[in-house]
Amino acid sequence: MNRATRTHPRRALVVLAAALLTLTLAPPGRAVAAGTVTEVVVSQAGYSAGAYKTAYVLATGTLADPTFEVLSGGAVVGGGTLVDEGVTWDRRVYSADLSAVTTAGTQVTVTSNGISSHPFPIAANIWTGYTDEMTAFYRIQRASVATADAYPAGYSSVAPSAKVFHAAGHLDDARAEDGTRYDLTGGWYDAGDYGKYGGNQWVGGEIALAYLRHADAAQVRQDRDGNGIPDLIDEARWGSEYLVKFADQLGGALYNIRNRGGFVHPEKLTDNVPGTADDRVLTDLSVGGSAKAAGTLAATARAIRHAVAAGHVTGAAATDLAAFADTARAAALTTYGYAAANPDGPEGTYVTVGGIPNAMLWAEVQLHLLTGEAGYATAAAAKIATLTFDDLRATNYWDLRPISMAEFYPVADAATRTRIQALLRQQAQFFLSSTDDTPYGVLNQFKNFGVNEPHASYLGDMVRYYELFGDPAVLRAVLKGTYWIFGANPWNISWVSGIGADHVDYLHTRLDEEAYSRTSPGVVIPGAMVSGPNAHDTRDRRSVSPWYADRPLWQDDTSQWRYNEYSISIQAGLLYTVTGLAALNGEPTTGGPVPTRMPVTTPVIGDFVTGSVTVLAQGEGPVTGVRHNADGTWKPMTSTDGAYRGTFSVDGFAPYTTRRVDVRATDAAGRVTYSSAHYTVAPPLPAPGNPLRYDDFGGAGTFGGTGQHWVNWYNEHAGTGTYARTTDDGRSVGRFSQNPNSAQSRAKFEPWHDTVDLSGYRYLSMTMRNPGSPDARMRFDINDGTRNFQLTAGFVAVPGTWTTYEFDLDALAGLDKTRIHPVIWLNQAGGQPGQLLVDDITAVNRPGGTAPTLTASAVSATTGGTSTEFTFTTTYTDANNQAPFTVDVVIDGVIHVMAPVDPADTTYTDGAAYRFTTRLAAGRHSYYFRTTDTTTNPVKTTTWTGPTVG
């Protein structure tokens, strides 16, 4: 479905968020504007008729009419009263329980206050309709084959976009760096590019297990291509055939075959003739990949043998498939043997927690289940015996322990089963309590590569937990978490391509040759799940948090597309989940133990913090052993004034760093409960003593710290340019090089499309020198998205010694300092190759005048309840009548921008009053005020204890 780019409403100013919160939480009896419904969000994939179902109504404030209706074909089939879930991410959230609605339909909607959801289906088993899209995704990702051959017409109910179909490509994979030629065609392209990576070769194993766990369910044995083999077996075999080649030709050593080329179909990137110069090269030996491959091969052999024995394979296909199971078994032994013989070798890309032994556990469990040999079980049990919960993550390339333990549990000895159950139970408790931080049932771990991959990875683990232990609370959490992926989220979008009335359009994939076209409508790759919301907009560190937009690729560059990335590993947890739900449809989801909620009440996601930060958490029942890990180790929190309290410091972290603090405790029933909070480190207040480094060319600065590099996209009048980091005179520097075509050639260098907010800074400083290039000249520009400014007023000669220049930004009329994009031009007046070395680019201020003062600082009450409105006030005075850059109150380390009491009062010599009003969470707080006039160092008041909120 095509539509305008969707952006979540952003919090432009902290003070606006506080105003919204105040409006929303106004106490009874106070006249406030009634809340308005903005969206009704649902699982656009639909719901099974007899299952737990939930949707959400999002509003600007408290609703006068908290009811909803469910309509099917225009007739009301259900409804009820909304449950007020409070404010999450600056919106009032109400949940609607649809579980009582069992009427089947294809155009069902939920409405509230005149706003309707997208239509969705209700069916007896909704998940059987999506198992085809799960394997369809992997078929589209198959390498070295024409898409039409892998994807027969009508294979899935959602058809791929015509433009993703392509001819067979990379038929010349691959050669070693020494020139030796290997046949390593096949496998899956890992992601939206065409790379194939050793560290992701565990994926075929999870696909095989998706069949093996529920092979008795007919909906799991689908055969959409009619070849007599269940599609899950087809796909597991396809992945394993690739791994057999490494066993046969390289003795089990796994390598990467990295992507090379742009946004064109794969057959256009090489000549497809083995033995020529453009053959892709093997890189990055991956011993961990060998162990992962061994597990996949063994799991595939197990699945095939079961399919053949159970009669799930028809006709002549059974004989061929049985033979391949033997081949896969032999290859599994070879790849495992290679990994076992090289325990100290390089793990390779896509590393696992704990290194190669993690992947070895996966291999040993699968080999034991395949061969029955006790040695593998002994080795697996020994690894499990040393594990604690802190060693575990979700099943993905980063941790194969959860899936390995779930597989091993039925056959393990009694002591190992006890340990496995305890570890997996705590993982389930972690997921249940982490997903109750918000009403949406999503894993509360937002980073800058999307939350959906770790979230779906946990969903797969939770399905396996239910398969073993039958906990209905876990299955309910799986459903709720899956609804999030398919549209029950604040962005009102399904993050699975092709599924839902409003699904993601702009997948990051080279299969879309129009990806950079401003007229491209996007692409459909059935079942592809994108990584989804980030902690912040990858192009704007000041953005709302969490953030997502279905943004076309032409608006992004470098790693900024990560929110719409997909890959075979991102998909794996979702495939297992959908397959499992199809087989488990109708299983009970009511009841079951859940950990006591213990939400972190400050800081909250989106907060900008500075200095010493207080973390507050409040258990909704008795808890003990409350700890936080803000500093990387678990430290005790104290119970003070009705909340648990801890402190940590963000001093030393770079500006705009996004971090997370976790809190954990044990409830009265012995269940472990977790909660998380995300925050962003604020930049320093602009002042002479607080320069803002943009790039030191050594890995620091708002751009330099991102790990990205300057690029040369454009050369005027021909020639080429290159950029590299190097050292000179003991300095870490950027080397900008030009190979001109003539004296008129000009090389343009940019920090990708990065922008920086230099508000409050007057000067932009650059340190540079000419390392000896004749006639080297440079030009330093900045632009703000509307206008371009030449700071050097044209090209200037570069001195031979290190020289620092300062450019006055205030002299540039009309410059928008909030979105500065620097550009360096290089020109060799004599037309010869040349270089420029740059050591540092920093925004600075010069000292001047008298520092302002903050007086009459106070808060309106020292005690109160969670509905009390606390007003913080201070008076700003400046003898030079300089306006403040900002006046802030910092509460518990969280920065809140204050507003003038009288906006018309701009005479600061006799003082101007500022205030900020908010409600506070339970517990004992602390606060101080700060300001700067930018020409003197920041002013900070005493830190006061209070208010205390009960």
Image (cartoon, grey):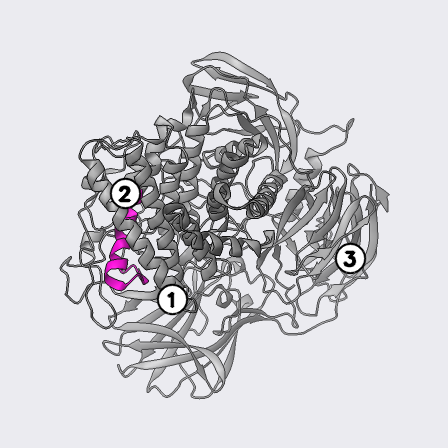
Q: Quadrant of residue 80?
A: top right
Q: Residues within 10 Å of mark 2 (few under 14, many from 20)?
A: many
Q: Quadrant of residue 73?
A: top left
- Sequence-wise, the earlier of marks 2 and 3 is 2
- Sequence-wise, the earlier of marks 2 and 1 is 2
As drawn, the label of residue 341 is: 1
Tags 1 and 3 touching, CB below 8 Å = no
Q: Quadrant of the N terminus?
A: top left
Q: Secondary structure at mark 2?
A: helix
User: Residue 775 versus residue 144: which sits nearer the camera?
Assistant: 144
Instruction: Name the residue beneath numbered marker 3.
Output: 928
User: Residue 493 versus residue 837: which sits nearer the camera?
Assistant: 493
As drawn, the label of residue 717 is: none
Q: Residue 204, image x and y in percent?
A: 35, 46
Q: Amino acid at mark 2?
A: Ile
- Picture residue at 51% right of the left edge, 32% below the top: 479
Q: Amino acid at mark 1?
A: Ala
Q: Amino acid at mark 3?
A: Tyr
Left or right position of 458 against 339:
right
Left or right position of 227 against 134:
left
Question: Disc 1 versus disc 3: distance between alpha carbons?
Answer: 60 Å
User: Residue 664 versus residue 287: which sits nearer the camera?
Assistant: 287
- Sequence-wise, the earlier of marks 1 and 3 is 1
Q: Residue 827, image x and y in percent?
A: 33, 77
Residue 557 seen in this snapshot? no
Looking at the rendering, the stretch of residues picked out in magenta corresponds to 236-261
Q: Residues within 10 Å of mark 1 (few under 14, many from 20)?
A: few
Q: Secondary structure at mark 3?
A: strand
Q: Residue 50, image x and y in percent?
A: 49, 20
As drawn, the label of residue 140 is: 2
Q: Quadrant of residue 652?
A: bottom right
